Amino acid sequence: MWEVGADGQADEVAFSSEYPEAVMALAFVGPDLVIGAEGGAIRRWPFGVGGAMASFQEPDEEVDITSMAFSVRGILAVGEDEGVIQLRHPGDYAVETLLEGHTGTINNMAFSTDGRILASGSDDGTLRLWNVDAGEELIALTDHTHQIRDLALSASGDIASASMDGKVRMWQLTSSLHGDFYSGHQGYIFESLMGAAWSAAISPDMHTLAFGDNFFVWLKNMASGESSGSFMLGPIVHSVAFSPDGSLVAAGGGLGEGVVRVWDIETGDEVLTLEGRTGSLVTVLFDPTGATLLTGGTGETNDIQVWDIATGNELARFQGHTGGVFSLAFSPDATLLASGSGDDTVRLWNVATQEELAVLAGHTSEVDALAFSPDGALLISGSHDRSIRVWDVETGKLLVVIEDLLGGVTGLAFTPDGELLVSGGSDGTVRLWGVESLDPAQ
């Protein structure tokens, strides 16, 4: 063990010769050093206090420890020569999760700055990203043709990988998924490394697209396609929304613990954080004034909560749903709020009093999308049951049902003139419907 002084000189401060196996991986864990070796042995050396080396995994000739990394959250990742990654619990370092997917030796690993993402490189030539909390693979990047020998994560989330194929690839999260080489580096530029795009919104001035993936909110200039910035939310960005003046962007998500964050787009500052709710926050919506934010989700409550942007205080609740809230929409005059839920209903509310005005029943699965017509006379709902329903807002009467679509309905929007309805589905299709006939317009 060496201590490097300000003058660049290194002095030996600790030495141990008691390790019987060949040492293959090292990781600092707080004030201690964790040592991995051939034969699967893992030992902890409290060198700072002159303590003796202690073993918490005895040798097993069937496996070698080839890589280790320690996260800011206290989790120790241990890579094996057989391609398995152990995630060990803080404290006793018992194995909590096994990450399986690689087919070759794990050569290197690195955690993101918040400890929620783990990157791993392997002899199988793949770079893989893992959701640490869920214990699941986010994506496998397969462009290298030989073993990945080293990798690094920047604070902004960019990844560099070095391979025996003679290339160092820079993986950026802000460009084309099938894009060009990046700034002369031997690497591709990616739109998003974090799996599916879960949510999207367009700014009121139509200049900026925001979309959420498994961890980040990305901002793109719609004219040039260039990145305008990015923000870290956490596991699964279920919903994004712009404030009415376009100065703020909000995102809601979470796995097991819901979180909402609001950022100032110009400064990049986080202006509001709401955490601690059990479940996921699936939908966020600014009120038409931009002063409050509405949130709905799953978990400890099925209420729609109203938050003051300036103070973070909860101002009101809409109560009545018996399942999670998955979609929200204001009427054009902002006097009504519509909500879609996992209880298979759509509900209409008086915005000023939070009074429930109507329960619109008919869907047989969660309601994931809502849209008012521009004149406020119609409310359209889309569901996981693969149907679209058209409701008369004044009477609550069901007017039209479109059933047996190829997938669940995940998004709805009217054209500004109200003549066409756009629907997006889990089958990967976007459809245009003539509102008068509700036959496909294209």
Image (spheres, helix red, strand yellow):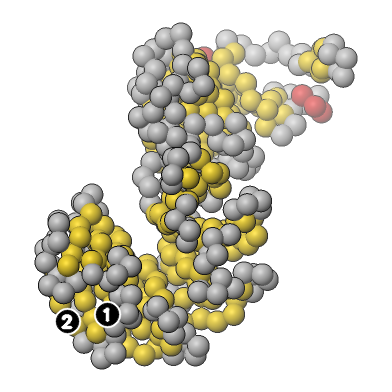
Q: Please, is residue 159 above or below residue 253 in the view?
A: above
Give whichever of 214, 42 is nearer the camera.
Answer: 214
Which residue is rendered at x = 54% and y = 60% of the image?
246
Residue on which disc 2 sits: 399
Q: Secondary structure at mark 2?
A: strand
Q: Residue at x 64, y 40 (%)?
A: 72
Q: Which sits in the foreground, 142 or 322? A: 142
- Dividing the picture into quadrants, the one containing residue 319 is bottom left
Quarter of the figure that contains the N terminus: top right
Task: Specify whether residue 65 is in view.
Answer: no
Q: Is residue 308 above or below residue 98?
A: below
Which disc number belongs to residue 304? none
Q: Which disc is residue 378 wearing?
A: 1
Circles 1 and 2 in contact, beta carbons < 8 Å: yes
The percent coordinates of residue 226 (x first, y second) are 48, 38
Left or right: 151 with respect to 420?
right
Category of crowding for the residue at label 2, using alpha-carbon neighbours closer than 10 angstroms: few (below 14), some (14–19), many (at least 20)? few
Coordinates of residue 266 in the picture (x, y in percent) = 63, 52
Measured Cα–Cα span from mark 1 to mark 2: 9 Å
Image quarter where the C terminus lies is: bottom left
Q: Amino acid at mark 1?
A: Leu
**What residue is at 27 percent from the left and 71 percent from the top?**
418
Residue under the point 66% across and 51% down:
267
- How many other residues sit within 10 Å of disc 1, few (<14), some (14-19) or many (≥20)? many
Q: In the shown orientation, is residue 174 left or right of residue 339?
A: right
- First in residue order: circle 1 vs circle 2: 1
Compared across the picture, whether 239 is left or right of 35 comes to left
Which amino acid lies under the numbered mark 2 shown in the image of this protein?
Leu
Q: Is residue 24 above or below residue 278?
A: above
